[in-house]
Amino acid sequence: MSLLDEIEPMKAEALAELSAAPDQQALERAKGAWIGPKGKFTGLMKQLGSLSKEERPLAGKAINQAKGELEQALLAARERIEMAASVPTEPTDFTAPGRCRRLGRLHPLTQVTEDIVKSFRKLGFVVADGPEVEDEYHCFDALNTPADHPARDAQDTFYLDQPDRPLLRTHTSSVQIRVMKEQSPPVRIIVPGRVYRRDTADATHNPTFQQVEGLYVDKGVTVGDLKGTVEFVFRELMGPKTQIRFRPHYFSYTEPSFEIDFANSLTKKMGKDWLEIAGCGMVHPAVFEEVGYDPEVWTGWAFGFGIERIAMLRYGINDIRLFYENDVRFLEQF
Amino acid sequence: MKVTYNWLKEYVDFDWSPEELAERLTMLGVEVEGVETCAGAFEGIVVGQVIVKEQHPNADRLTLCKVNDGEEERQIVCGATNFEVGDKVALALPGTSMPVEEGEKPFVLKAGKIRGEKSEGMMCSGRELRLSDDHEGILILEENAVVGQSFGEHRGLGGGDTVYDLEVTPNRPDLNGVIGLAREIAALTGNALRKPDVKLAESDDAVENLVDVRIEDAGLCPRYNARVIREVKIGPSPDWLRERLERVGLRPINNVVDATNFVMMETGQPLHAFDLRLLDAAGGKPTVVIRRAANGEKFTTLDEQEHELTAENLLIADEGKGIALAGVMGGLNTEIQPDTQDVLLECAYFNPTNIRATSKATRLHTDASYRFERGADIGITDWASQRAAQLILETAGGELAAGAVDAFPEKPESREVMLRHDKVNALLGIELSPEQNTAYLEGLEISHAGDGVFRIPSWRVDLKRETDLIEEVCRLHGVDRIPATPPRGALGDNSFDTVHDELAEARAILTGLGLNEAQGQTLISGESARLTTPEVIALEHPLSSDMDVLRASLLPGLLDSLRNNVTRRNDDVGLFEIGRVFKPGEGEHRRLAILMTGLVEPAFWGDRDGQKVSMADLTGVLEGFLERFGVFGVGVERRSDATDFFLESAELRLGKQEIGELGQLQPALGRGCECRQPVFLAELDMDLLLQRRTRTKSFKALPQFPSIVRDVAMVVPESTTHAKVLGVVKKAKPANLVDLRLFDVFRGGNVPAGQKSVAYTFTYRHGEKTLTDEEVNGAHEELVETLREQLSAVIRDT
């Protein structure tokens, strides 16, 4: 039989083997057997020398053509096997828990603070800051709270065992004084920060807690302005249907002074008509005099509230100590 | 301060319900903290009159009666027979909760049938009313008893009432008395304030003959008023007085003491009664001396506590001994006895600051000291004394000596405050007329002296300047009637504003790196604070030893949080905190601290063991954070030795500045937190990071041409750090090298001990053309040669 006649059946046999290869390994074996360096077609090429001059170009062409076809078939088989391999061997359980990179959370108090800051910033307020270790002047005296004033006792204060007896600020209002002493009016600031009172820790008290103070000083600022801003901020924070009520109260550094109550679906759920949320008032002229503002020209209001309280109300948290324990199961809920 | 609805009604008319009154008081600035309704004694029991008395048709021992309850006749079946038609009786109506002994179950009377006859109530025996042990028959009342009147009223009791617990702000001592509160209501309603009429029948004896008063320190006691009532009969107070005091939380003692307490609650002015015979009368009559105590002077108060006094304490004394701690508590040696006959009645004004100091020093906080330290009404002294004398005469009898010794050396001038009406409108943001403002103030007895000047009554110690008057107008007008004005445009300005955002940015990056934000206590225990530094700031009077110093580092707080987690079986903890620390002499600084332990990622079913946190996870987080936050060039310097806190640690440096540290916690400290896994911690100076961060970002064109990579594996001594390799490469500056990456570290096998095999991938790229292998090979081979020489590296075949 002529070599030329062998080509066609060999090609058919090789094609069948390639297309039947069940996996990559079998395919590689088949490739080696037919078109590898020791393969049968490579062998045929080596036999070309034994052919007559007339037959040689014909046979060479036929062998190359067949080899080309086999290469094509090899590629096709490879693709077929790869595609088959990507098919899941078992049906996927789409309900199995996914794999996810850990993403941390902001502390709930940080989140509430940021929300408060955002709503104030809409009104042109900027954030200010001051030291937590304060002196009596900034914390009390400049805020119109004389040494023997009963209000000063009500805020039981931590003094430090240091020269000059510095203290831990009992409210963020001390920053009012620092800012007003540094900049001339108008002033529009909010001051979030830690404050300290000598309360034994329980479900509603922690010696360390956080407040936000707002201060606005300008010409012609009125109680009406105070109400307008407070209503805006609390509706932003506690929902648009939140009702706000002002009650006369007493703080030494504001006059008139008010306490602010709110009511919304949350207070209803708690079975209360009103819930106290903040204190505020018109800056006392004595405070203005202390920082060198002329109370005949400038008026202003200040208000302050506890951040934990807002967070506790908003999320329904019943124990203030949770904020400072940093249990990750707590932190990851917010 | 407690007050009742009915008590207020005695001084002013108002037609508000008890709930409305609470709301009104609250809106006036007197917050109602609690409301309690108390049933009147004998509620549901009325005075009835027997109209018909017959034999019960079905029972020999029962009578069938008709009793008039004031409105109608009721049929009552009764077991007693000790009464006649026409007798007045105590008739309990159906629904009445019968009086019971403490601890007994309440018994509610019902209408029903007894032996076939209906019975609509019960005629009560003394025992059933808990008035006596008599249960032989029903109680027969006096002939003049009024049919239909409640039995409580019949006995002189007030009936049901509502008790309010009020939060009186410290600036308003005048509201610590019922009359002061009634004055507020009078101002709000426009109705008149009815102060009780005081008319005293005095004997012929002048009080000056019975007692003398000598004030030695008029600064501490500007006014002292004494009256004497002789021949009183000490005994229990009448029911109405006992009931009043009990309702506002005071314990009845005896008629004289109760009268003084009643007047204190009524007027806000504390009074004290002495047994006159117990005062030293060596000079013929006793002299009340108001003096400073001697240093070290011992004095025993009514509560049988002995106090050692100083010259800072004001003492009421006779010529020989102290008899009362002024304004705080009376003395045991002169208190009213069951057989007291002559009463010395003290009514005074004491300096608030001094009373406050004495109350604090002696730890005696009494109803009296509470009122004096907030400021009593110096103008009411004599009137309050008369009022108390009147009540003592009414309840304990006796004779009142004529007049009073009223030592009042310097009468203070009444204060005047100017009010400009346009200022009211400017501050409140509403339009009120001058007449309106004046009317509001006059309602509070702040009288207009003309030309906008107002005269402040003696009880309003809080009204000092214009703005105080504006507040009064605001309260009476009602803050709820001031319309809210929308926020107005103006821009705030403060340098901290951007810092706030930068800190928020840092937090956002750290949460993105998989850490939860923690907020630790500022106050921690000295013991844990000293884990990181010997220098801490202590509190002067800490609440407890676990909160006695200011944190000087955030790390001890993170260990506390670690303990909170591990003891609750949260073993995988990744936390960060940005907070302030405090160091003596250095003030406050912001720091960033990180703690990581347990698994890197949440446990996953496809990889059951998970990957445990290693130092590389911490350094990875730090690198990621610093890069994203814009702090470049941070160097790490390993500390050669362990510290008390860290098993192994390194300093973080930025140039010459130390900006923080990181390390692995000493396992013993980890165990202290119940944590058995390695714990990795870092702490950085946040203020420095804020200073040193670069926030400018600029675009670099994306690479256009392909890169060529070459891998090098080499064996180097253990001491050769990654930083060292980087240093050599950086110095060699191979042409077109754009990146190198450590991809393997291998120890053991054929790598000799004390050495390690490190493998790097070097990436070469040209910005403007495609590099050829030949171009790269030259530079790369040169680099490999440099590494071999400078790192004593043995290059391995790759």
Image: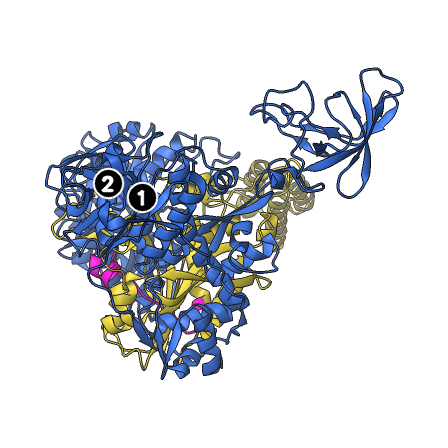
Report the side of B12 relative to B347 (left or right): right
Q: What's the distance in space between the residues labelled 2 and 1, CA to CA?
A: 9 Å
Question: Can you give x and y, in whole percent of width and height, for residue B262 in the image?
Answer: 42, 45
Q: Chain under label 2?
A: B
Q: Quadrant of residue A15?
A: top right
Report the side of A143 relative to B46 (left or right): left
Foreground: B149 or B687? B149
Q: Residue furthest top?
A: B60
Question: Can you give x and y, in whole percent of width and height, for residue B382 in the image?
Answer: 32, 56
Q: Amino acid at mark 2?
A: Ala
**Chain painted in blue in the figure:** B
The disc placed on residue A103 is none
Q: What's the colour scheme?
A: by chain
The disc placed on residue B272 is 1
Question: Can you give x and y, in whole percent of width and height, for residue B287 in the image?
Answer: 18, 44
Name the residue beneath numbered marker 2.
B324
**Chain A, chosen colour in render:** yellow
Asked if disc 2 and disc 1 are in contact, CB closer than 8 Å, the reply is yes
Element under disc 1: strand
Q: Amino acid at mark 1?
A: His
Foreground: A76 or B463? B463
Report the side of B534 relative to B455 (left or right): left
The reply to whether label 2 and label 1 mark residues of one chain is: yes
| Range drawn in magenta | A120-141
